[in-house]
Image (cartoon, helix red, strand yellow):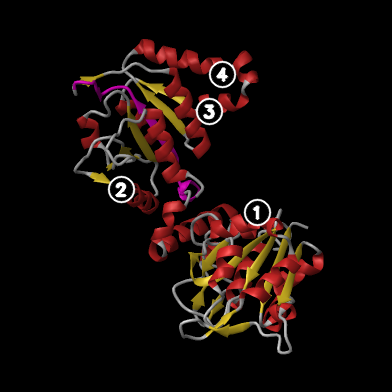
Amino acid sequence: MSVRISIVTAFPELVRSYLHTGILGRGAKSGKLEVSVVDIRDHATGEYRQIDDYSFGGGGMVLMRGPLEEALRGIASREERYVVYPSPQGVPVYQEMIEDLFRISGSRHLVIVCGRYEGVDERFVRENVDLEVSMGDFVLTGGELPALAIADAVSRLEKGVVGKERAVEEDSFFSGMLDHPHYTRPANYEGDEVPEVLLGGNHEEIADYRRREAVSRTLARRPDIIARANIMPYLSHGVYVIEVHHPVLDRNGKKSATAITGLDLHDIARACRTYGVKKHLVVTPLEAQRDMVKKIASHWLTGYGASFNPDRREAMALIKTFASIERALAWIEDKEKQAPFTIATTAKQNARASHWLGLKREMLRNDAPAAFLFGTGGGLHEELLERADAVLTPILGGKDGYNHLSVRSAAAIILDRFFGFR
């Protein structure tokens, strides 16, 4: 058993009735969950078992610190528990937070304290609460509903609580995107028909339909969440990285060709493999440089290098050389049967530059193959910036404007923004 949750409340029956039904009830009966309800009044003193009192300075009733702390002591020691307090002042709840709480519940007892009236004594919050959370910018009469929502969301991540594990992975927000629409019988309800593709039995076509519907819904309803989504699974075509060594700028701002380095090859290839990029294309007009790339890659693709480090072999297998940008883009078009959407990167300000989040949404809307152009040396030459379908705004960091990342660092950062899993 890995999930242990206790809900501390002044209204235990409200909570118990929900815990005994549905997924939480089945999970508890199967032994995969341990969810208990703690009545604050059981830890109060005096004839009336008082748990609340008037707020100093005027105002409504506030839950007292003493009974709440006694309730916590009865559950677990300070080191063994993790206390969550739902309140309007808390951090908005999001999926990654729920997953963090699930991981915590495997080693510490997760305790959710339900406030009532005007809340709880601030001294209790300061000394006992590890995480204060909010369900949104509205006020409820108590913390029971948020507590049940948190318990439900955490519990369903425990393997076997929800019937099909894949159903959890396909839910809205788990992958960073909204879920696709669902339909059930009858296929025709008063003239309103289920999409025909879902009735045909072609699993590949159904998967493609659902993927595109998830994209459409997310763009229309919650474009904000795309910032933390990996969009790679939602693209119909491949993504390519082009490491450009010509035409680029030298340190004097003149058109030039740069030398290829082993560090760039290895690190960009590894980033490409990590984020699901289809190919790492290296462009240089110098035949000797292309031969060197092939020699470096071959060391890891055959013989001792391949057996010594299979992970490096997978990365280096993505490398392919070309004498020009034109040939590289033509090769992508031939493979994908569609011209790629080209995104140029630069460390300099550019009038055409677009923010990465806007381009991320545009990639989803276009659903075309994509090619990211990374310039070496002083960066891509102006002719490539002008020819590209889009230009990405520079990566910005420190307050003093310093901006001199290596091409391999820039490639990793940009790939993570577009294809990192949250």
* 350 displayed left or right of 303: left
Locate residue 106: give its quadrant. Answer: bottom right
Q: Residues within 10 Å of mark 3 (few under 14, many from 20)?
A: many
- The numbered mark at residue 315 is 3
Q: Which residue is pictured at 48% across the width and 48% down the height?
A: 230
Q: Is residue 283 shown above or below 339?
A: above
Residue position marked by numbered label 2 in the rendering: 355
Residue type at mark 4 is Trp
Mark with earlier residue (2, 3): 3
Q: Which mark is first along the chain, 2 or 4?
A: 4
Q: Left of 394 or right of it: where is 351? A: left
Where does label 4 land, which residue? 300
Q: CA distance from mark 2 to mark 3?
A: 28 Å
- Which amino acid lies under the numbered mark 1 shown in the image of this protein? Arg
Of the pair 14 and 279, the residue shown nearer to us? 14
Which residue in the protein does label 1 denote?
103
Marks 1 and 4 sit apart, C-alpha to C-alpha, by 37 Å
Mark 4 nearby-residue class (10 Å; few <14, some 14–19, many ≥20): many
- Callout 4–callout 2 Cβ contact below 8 Å: no
Q: Nearer the viewer, residue 104 or 356?
A: 104
- Which segment is the magenta one? 231-252
Reply above or below: 284 against 158: above
Label 4: which secondary element: helix
The amino acid type, in three-letter code, at marker 3 is: Ala
Distance CA(mark 3)–CA(mark 1): 31 Å
Question: In front here: 367 or 52?
Answer: 52
